Amino acid sequence: MNLNILGLAEVRWTGAGSMKLGSKTLIYSGGHTHERGVGILFDVTTAKSLGSWCPISDRVVVTNLVAKPLNLGIIQVYAPTSDSEDAEVEKFYEEIEKAKGYLKSQNIIILMGDFNAKVGDERVEDVAGPIGPLGFKSTLGDSGLGRVPEIEVKTK
């Protein structure tokens, strides 16, 4: 399998940083404990385009790749579960907004990661088609899909 960019969730490392792993480059963002954490792994060619990056929290990291005709912004996330307090979920979406603010408006933005949401088997216009015949929605799935247009992520 040939991967250029790989988003990681539950990295479980503390602090933030970047490192070489063989021919790959990893940027990561963690907290003070070995919980949560996110990262993005780049192959050697893609890493050459790596511009600035910012560890927002142990749930969100953002990077800018220098590309043509437009730069590419990548926001990697690890969302709270549906058991989480509303305040934690709200903080997560605020962190996505902060990450988005780090990027220029003309960037192509990819929002990726583990959203811990069950979106069900229904079609949700402009967001996603059916995920599978056995799916079901969770509360976080409903609020998560509702927030996607709010953070103005293009889905087409």
Image (tube, rainbow, N blue to C red):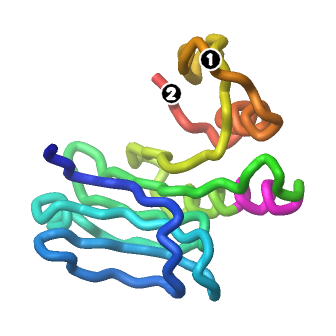
The residue carrying pointer 1 sits among few (fewer than 14), some (14 to 19) or many (20 or more) residues within 10 Å by Cα, namely few
Q: What residue type is labelled 1?
A: Leu
Q: Is residue 16 left or right of residue 4?
A: right
Instruction: Give coordinates of residue 81: x percent, y percent.
Output: 73, 51
In magenta stretch: residue 142: no
Kindly report the distance in space between the C-alpha atoms of the residues bearing marks 1 and 2: 23 Å
7 versus 18 height, above or below: above
Identify which residue is drawn at 22% across, 43% down: 69
Instruction: Give coordinates of residue 143: x percent, y percent.
Output: 79, 37
- Report the span colored magenta: 87-94
Q: Residue 134 carries which label?
A: 1
Q: Which mark is residue 155?
A: 2
Identify which residue is drawn at 69% across, 32% down: 145
Identify the image quadrant of the N terminus. Answer: top left
For residue 60, which quarter of the picture?
bottom right
Instruction: Give coordinates of residue 2: x percent, y percent.
Output: 14, 46
Name the secondary structure under disc 2.
loop
Between 152 and 11, the one lying in front of the other is 11
Q: Is residue 19 left or right of residue 104?
A: left
- Of circles 1 and 2, the one toward us is 1
Identify which residue is drawn at 48% across, 55% down: 75
Instruction: Give coordinates of residue 132: x percent, y percent.
Output: 54, 17
Q: Residue 123 carries which label?
A: none
Between 153 and 58, the one lying in front of the other is 58
Q: What residue type is labelled 2?
A: Thr
Between 2 and 70, the one lying in front of the other is 2
Identify which residue is drawn at 56% across, 37% down: 153
Between 91 and 137, the one lying in front of the other is 137
